[in-house]
Image: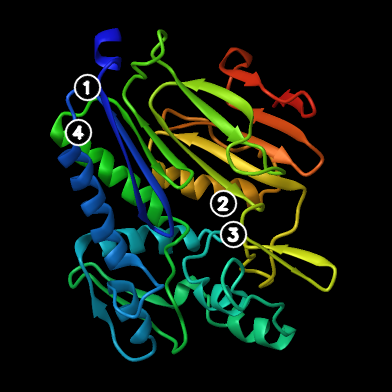
């Protein structure tokens, strides 16, 4: 293991609106990481809603008019997102009209009039999507509806990059898509083979960790209210919009981090737990879902599914408890 740890390659890219970091241990080379980035960019080109031309934009532009056939990957991800949206726990892949209205984190963000929020709520019903498994087609039944897979796409892409690494024989490494972290194989640079996952302090700049988690191969994904904000008229609004109200979902949580086997699963579960307002008694820790870490606005850290020997508190101004 020590011999492998001495050899690794690390590269930084830009994509998905964030910084992308790939680190692969062993015999991986620069082309392997460039191929990974090319795969990411191909998915981004198909799934983006921030450009005029993409598969998803074609679906959105045909809303209320006709179905659009898309690639296998776009169809399967959309199908997963729509099925998840229909569970009605807070995840909604049709939230696009509300996101575009608020623009939180983008130029021109402002508090929308209540009437405009109400009108957008009529356009985010996940039952108003027709999926055709034979044609791989997607039909948004009402004009003005918009698919936005931003809440799930990073996880899906991270999983696909891990598949590529598996095919290339890359046995261990880190895939970091702007805070969406996937850790493959063992950590060769630690004698115990476990990765160290830092939990961001939601009240200070990026890079300050308040907790360290020792864990094996997993994906760690965080939903937080601290990076994209709108401050207006003496109030602060975060970007996690509630599809039931049209406004940012208010609770005592600053962030939720979930550890899972698959990254796309972690994306879904962070949203589920954020909208649950804290630890859920019936939330399943399974062979594929490992645990969760909640950070509250009053500086409490609540840990579910992990043992005390897996967790180290790095900032004693926070209170740590295990649920």
Residues at badges 3 and 2 in contact (C-beta under 8 Å)? yes
The numbered disc on residue 1 is: none
Please state which of residues 4 and 212 is positioned toward the viewer in this rendering. 4
Q: Which residue is drawn at 30% across and 16% down?
A: 5
The numbered disc on residue 90 is: 3
Spatial separation of the CA atoms under disc 4 and disc 3: 33 Å
Residues at badges 3 and 1 in contact (C-beta under 8 Å)? no
* Residue pointed to by mark 1: 26
Above/below status of 46 relative to 223: below
The reply to whether residue 58 is visible in this rendering is yes
Q: In this view, does 227 lie to the left or right of 50?
A: right
Q: How crowded is mark 2: few (under 14 residues within 10 Å), some or many (20 or more)?
A: many
**Mark 2 or mark 4, whichever is nearer to me:** 4
**Mark 1 or mark 4, whichever is nearer to me:** 1
The quadrant in which the C terminus is found is: top right
Q: Position of residue 44 (x, y in %)?
A: 31, 62
Residues at badges 4 and 3 in contact (C-beta under 8 Å)? no
* Residue pointed to by mark 2: 271
Above/below status of 221 relative to 174: below
Residues at badges 2 and 4 in contact (C-beta under 8 Å)? no
Spatial separation of the CA atoms under disc 3 and disc 1: 41 Å
């Amino acid at each position: 293991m020590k011999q492998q740890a001495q050899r690794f390659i690390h590269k930084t890219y830009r994509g998905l609106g964030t910084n992308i970091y790939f680190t692969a241990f062993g015999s991986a080379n620069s082309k392997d990481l460039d191929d990974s980035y090319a795969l990411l960019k191909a998915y981004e080109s198909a799934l983006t809603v921030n450009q005029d031309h993409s598969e998803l934009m074609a679906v959105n532009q045909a809303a209320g008019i006709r179905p659009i056939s898309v690639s296998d990957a776009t169809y399967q991800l959309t199908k997963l997102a729509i099925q998840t949206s229909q569970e009605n726990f807070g995840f909604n892949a049709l939230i696009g009209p509300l996101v575009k209205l608020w623009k939180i984190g983008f130029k021109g963000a402002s508090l929308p009039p209540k009437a405009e929020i109400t009108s957008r709520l009529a356009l985010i019903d996940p039952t108003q999507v027709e999926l055709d498994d034979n044609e791989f087609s997607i039909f948004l039944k009402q004009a003005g509806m918009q698919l936005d897979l931003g809440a799930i796409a990073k996880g899906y892409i991270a999983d696909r990059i891990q598949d590529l690494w598996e095919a290339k024989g890359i046995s261990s490494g880190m895939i970091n898509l702007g805070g969406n972290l996937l850790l493959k194989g063992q950590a060769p640079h630690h004698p115990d083979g476990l990765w160290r996952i830092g939990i961001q302090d939601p009240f200070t700049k990026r890079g300050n960790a308040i907790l360290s988690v020792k864990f094996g191969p997993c994906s760690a994904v965080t939903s937080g209210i601290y990076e994209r904000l709108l401050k207006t008229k003496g109030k602060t609004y975060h970007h996690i919009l509630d599809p039931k109200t049209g406004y940012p979902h208010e609770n005592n949580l600053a962030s939720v981090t979930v550890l899972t086997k698959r990254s796309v699963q972690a994306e879904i579960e962070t949203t589920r737990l954020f909208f649950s307002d804290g630890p859920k008694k019936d939330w399943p820790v399974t062979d594929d879902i490992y645990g969760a870490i909640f950070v509250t606005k009053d500086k409490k850290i609540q840990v579910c599914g992990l043992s005390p020997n897996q967790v180290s508190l790095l900032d004693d101004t926070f209170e740590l408890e295990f649920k």
